[in-house]
Image (cartoon, rainbow, N blue to C red):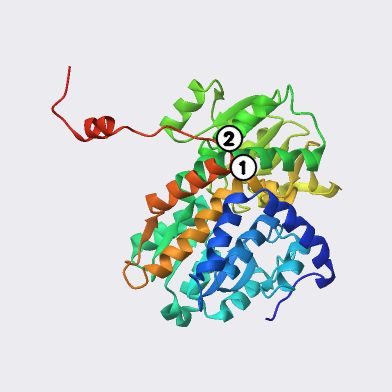
Amino acid sequence: MDYKVKDIGLAKEGEKLVRWAEQHMPVLMDIRKDFEREKPLKGIKIAACLHVTKETAVLIKTLQAGGAEVTLTGSNPLSTNDSVAAYLAKNGVGVYAWRGNHDEYYWCIEQALKIEPHITMDDGGDLITTLHTKQQNLIENVIGGTEETTTGVKRQRAMEKEGILRYPVVAVNDAMTKYLFDNRYGTGQSTIDGILRATSLLLAGKNFVIVGYGWCGKGLARRAAGMGAKVIVCEVDEIKALEAAMDGFQVMPIREAAKVGDIFVTVTGNKHVIDAPALQQMKDGAILANSGHFDNEINVGWLEENAVAKEEIRSNVMEYKLKDGRKIYLLAEGRLVNLAAAEGHPPDVMDMSFSNQALVVKWLVENKGKLENRVYRVPDEIDREVARRKLKTMDIEIDELTEEQIKYLRSWKEGT
């Protein structure tokens, strides 16, 4: 199959990384055994727009084991591991991805779509949006799609609401075995990892401002606090703000947090949540990072327009010197810091997220022609199957309800 990667010679290095990930993704590897035996995806073509990481490679190989033909493009210009891309390209995957493909990002998506997919897999929604705008002629072949992250699910629900979504999409992001673990523990740990790799700074004692207290923000707050940071949360949602306060964190508007913050991280899925008024208030040396899907959560354009000088002072650290002499540091171009400056989520947690992906693809194929053009939740039986398998790999047993307890839960007559 055709491909375009940075250097196919990196394949051996990528193979080692994938082997490491496979060792720590036992649920997905167990599903791979089932797929190898049953071939549920025989004859199915899949176009995927995902972060090209070692964990993604384990998913792609599992889909191949099920009989699928797969193309893959990166869902962010800076999140591709070039050695993993080379490894997959050498093993029959049409990969169109390399780190830094800013100018050819959408070209890569269009190349991946040439497979004329039956299934689409998205992380952020750029592939499905491209299909619905530039490649509408290919939609007739599509059985359904999956979406990995909050940002993409929001986009596809907006498409559904407008009546323009032309095939069913399953919000893998909304599976409990995804968001309760991937978003919370995965984003929490990997974001800290990216910040530390980029800056090498101590978090203890610093004012650590988190904009957004969804599951990603919750996980990040816990891990930053665990490293000794003084966590401040900024929110627009009354319930989430109240939750952050009762979790023990300071809650204040971004205009106030901007005056005292040392490190700022956005995790909202919204645009310009750190905007000019906040940037104007920040102290000299403030560090900005983003862990939301797109690079528009921080108004980077304002920094570009108002800086008198800028310099990459460390890998993934851009120093902006402003007219008043202050210096503000932006990590990883304002893109996903956990993937651009580190390796993304640990394989242990992606094990569950990508197990959902694999089983949902199988479910979509099995339900061809039976689904409406709307956004679906992951079927509960798949969600719980992933949890059961994960517990088994961790050698954890749980209790079962007795017949008496089942009967009691289904009844209404027995009371005080």
Label 2 element class: helix
Label 1 element class: helix
How many labels sit on residues?
2
* Residue occupying the point 41% across, 80% down: 140
Residue 217 at x, y percent in the picture: 56, 36
* Other residues around mark 1 within 10 Å, as few (<14) / some (14–19) / many (≥20): many
Q: Is residue 257 above or below residue 289?
A: above
Residue 84 visible here: yes
Amino acid on which the number 2 mark rests in the picture? Gly
* Residue occupying the point 57% across, 51% down: 27
Residue 304 visible here: no
Residue 285 at x, y percent in the picture: 78, 34
Q: Residue 187, located in which quarter of the rendered image?
A: top right
272 sits to left or right of 161 = right
* Other residues around mark 2 within 10 Å, as few (<14) / some (14–19) / many (≥20): many
* Residue occupying the point 69% across, 61% down: 77
Q: Residue 60, located in which quarter of the rendered image?
A: bottom right
Q: Mark on residue 187?
A: 1
Rendered-image quadrant of the C terminus:
top left
Residue designated by label 2: 219
Label 2 with label 1: CB-CB less than 8 Å: yes
How far is disc 2 from disc 1 in space, using C-alphas?
7 Å
Q: Is residue 49 above or below residue 333?
A: below
Q: Is residue 159 above or below residue 292?
A: below
